[in-house]
Image: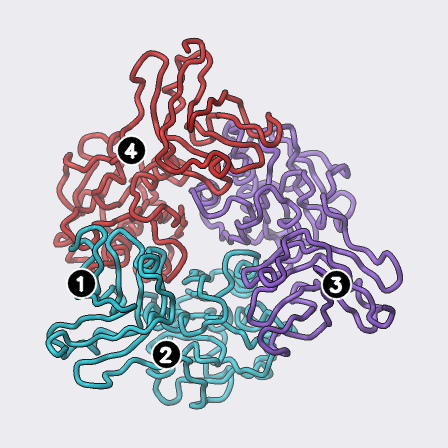
Chain colours: A purple, B cyan, C red
Amino acid sequence: MNVSGVITITTDFGHKGPFVGVMKGIILTRFPRASIVDLGHDIPAHWPPEAGFWLSRSYQYFPKGTVHLAIVDPGVGTERHILVVEHDDHIFIAPDNGLLDPILGAAGPGEIFRLETERLNDFELPEASQTFHGRDIFAPVAAEIAAGRLLPQNTGPRTDDWIPSWIETPEVRAPGKVSGIVITIDSFGNLISNIDERLLAGMKEPVARLAGKRFRMVETYGRVLPGDYMALINSFGVLEIARAEHSAADSLGTERGAPIVVVDGDRD
Amino acid sequence: MNVSGVITITTDFGHKGPFVGVMKGIILTRFPRASIVDLGHDIPAHWPPEAGFWLSRSYQYFPKGTVHLAIVDPGVGTERHILVVEHDDHIFIAPDNGLLDPILGAAGPGEIFRLETERLNDFELPEASQTFHGRDIFAPVAAEIAAGRLLPQNTGPRTDDWIPSWIETPEVRAPGKVSGIVITIDSFGNLISNIDERLLAGMKEPVARLAGKRFRMVETYGRVLPGDYMALINSFGVLEIARAEHSAADSLGTERGAPIVVVDGDRD
Amino acid sequence: MNVSGVITITTDFGHKGPFVGVMKGIILTRFPRASIVDLGHDIPAHWPPEAGFWLSRSYQYFPKGTVHLAIVDPGVGTERHILVVEHDDHIFIAPDNGLLDPILGAAGPGEIFRLETERLNDFELPEASQTFHGRDIFAPVAAEIAAGRLLPQNTGPRTDDWIPSWIETPEVRAPGKVSGIVITIDSFGNLISNIDERLLAGMKEPVARLAGKRFRMVETYGRVLPGDYMALINSFGVLEIARAEHSAADSLGTERGAPIVVVDGDRD
């Protein structure tokens, strides 16, 4: 694979303190021409599934050969592993805690590697701190891969043994019925589910149920009156509950993790 | 015009989710050498006038030939138009919803174009989603213009027909009296108005009135005691109400949109 | 010194408004190949010590020859000075208000300069506004230094006369006892002190005291049960109080500035 020189970073570090900035300093020290993009640092603390959801639905919009770093890592400093994945012409690096589940589930055999820092002696990694592997391990490895000096298959042994997500992948469990959750809430208060549009393909009139209410499907935000609720397939291909020009999350009092069910309206 | 390779992005997308990051991915895919600057993503949701205010007072500080993307777009997915403007050696791209009013009002004849995506077949835009034109239309068009491959006049027909802002431009309505509003509040709680310093030029002793209080003009924050209120012409050339080392917004309970009147102190 | 072309920016400007973006515009106008990294903009308003703390513990992770801009500047527009420091192969630019204390205390003779803009006529600085020196002075000077066209020693006269921090540097005041404060709180609610690990070197069993509670030292977050408190030396080499998978700040009701004492457990 040809590398693009682009590195994306996704964390739960928030915006206080120099944590992300320092990672960029390490990357630029090793690879001055790196083009670094923040995919987001407002992942809820210690909640890997949201990072994996967004990463799996965003990486396609970056150049092939991009390195994607994702660090939501409550187990930092313990014996948790780090995974390096080469899939669909992109490279992913994250702790082995379920974060990468949506990527790993799609990855083919031989695309997943378990990082062994002792194999990287040529790259002079610093002695890792106990609490900031983002700076001491993830950033240097990402920089060396993005610079084309380190190949994913040279970071450690191939593996098929990884930790799955805390969150079940939605499936069609009964004819005309799909269950999922609110996986994330955006800045507008739109409630974004992990229910892929393909799961609704067989339904004649899908109706979403959330917080005791029913929501009919529309095509876009502008098609209803201000204040109206709606369900729609959003631009990342998943079901979303929105309220036109309002925050659906505030209006419904709904939080991340709330269950959403979609049924075929004809049936109920 | 020579392009600078710089693209600025202004949105109301906030910092949750990968929305801005994905736009940067699209830009870097099409134009790897792009230099992308976030002008700000904390514009209040669905409030175009603040984006237009800041953009019109900030673009001058970027290199000539910079492309400025501004997306505050409650009408995404409906028939609203997109404008491309070439003015004062800069290029602006935004929805036609009043956002660009301060730029358009200053633009000369022949500088404003209405985007027609069907003219851009050579550039292989993706099929646009209903809800994320930032990714599917704005970012690709900005990248192609910034790369020098697409000229503003080739994006669509010239037009003089555009939607004005919701906010009236302040004017001198009576001798020694100007009315405006709090157009934005910064992180310090300073209340920034849309009243340009030129409108106060004829006054001997301008006094601002807001929230039932009167504020005398000073030159800078450091010229008063901590806790004192002041009015001043800020570094963007507009009237601002501040409280030294405090938040004027919190102290006065004032929100965006509040009316400000400036009168000549001699007269009242 | 060889310049790296990298510029970091640390401010208390927050994320509302285009203030940081406009500074980047100025930098890119003067030095198009600049690589600009945000070290952080959530420094508490008008609280220079936190900016100095983070900068002094972060700059080492950037390439040698990097220019570090730090602007927490309640005295903007008054007669406060601006310092330019060349130390440890890095360049620092900040207002002379104590912000740079940790850097200046380590700097050798002849490394500190007091900026005199009248020496910079060749660089055509704009007339400075009263309230936004970040844009009008700091950004242009940083760009010219980072581009290699301006040397620190040409920005003004050498000086050893600078304003110290509001915050005392922690010292070992009695055998087995060190006093400091909570200098900052990160997005996880971890309470980060200004007590360097070297001050604890002689202790057999250091115990931290904060908010009426005692905290024993552990090696990393993952070594205790969720909900447990701990003290640890963090990845920046200072004592930190954390609560596993919780916010210690929220749980303890502790704010920035709270006193922390470390005693040798054997003695008490």
Question: Nearer the observer, disc 3 or disc 4?
Answer: 3
Which is more N-terminal, label 4 or label 1?
A: 4
Q: Chain of mark 1?
A: C
Residue A142: x %, y % from top left? 56, 43
Q: Is residue C107 visible?
A: yes
Q: Amino acid at mark 1?
A: Glu
Residue C159: x %, y % from top left? 14, 37
Label 3: how many Cα within 10 Å (few below 14, some 14–19, many 20+): some
Left-right relation of C72 to A223? left
- Residue on which disc 1 sits: C127
Q: CA distance from mark 3 to mark 2?
A: 45 Å
Q: CA distance from mark 3 to mark 4?
A: 57 Å
Is disc 4 placed on a helix, strand or loop? helix
Q: Are marks 1 and 2 in contact (CB under 8 Å)?
A: no
Question: Nearer the observer, disc 1 or disc 3?
Answer: 3
Residue A44: x %, y % from top left? 58, 47
Question: Nearer the observer, disc 1 or disc 4?
Answer: 4
Q: Are marks 1 and 4 on the same chain?
A: yes
- For the N terminus of chain B, the quadrant is bottom left
Q: CA distance from mark 1 to mark 2?
A: 24 Å
- Residue on which disc 2 sits: B103
Q: Nearer the viewer, residue C4 or B53?
A: B53
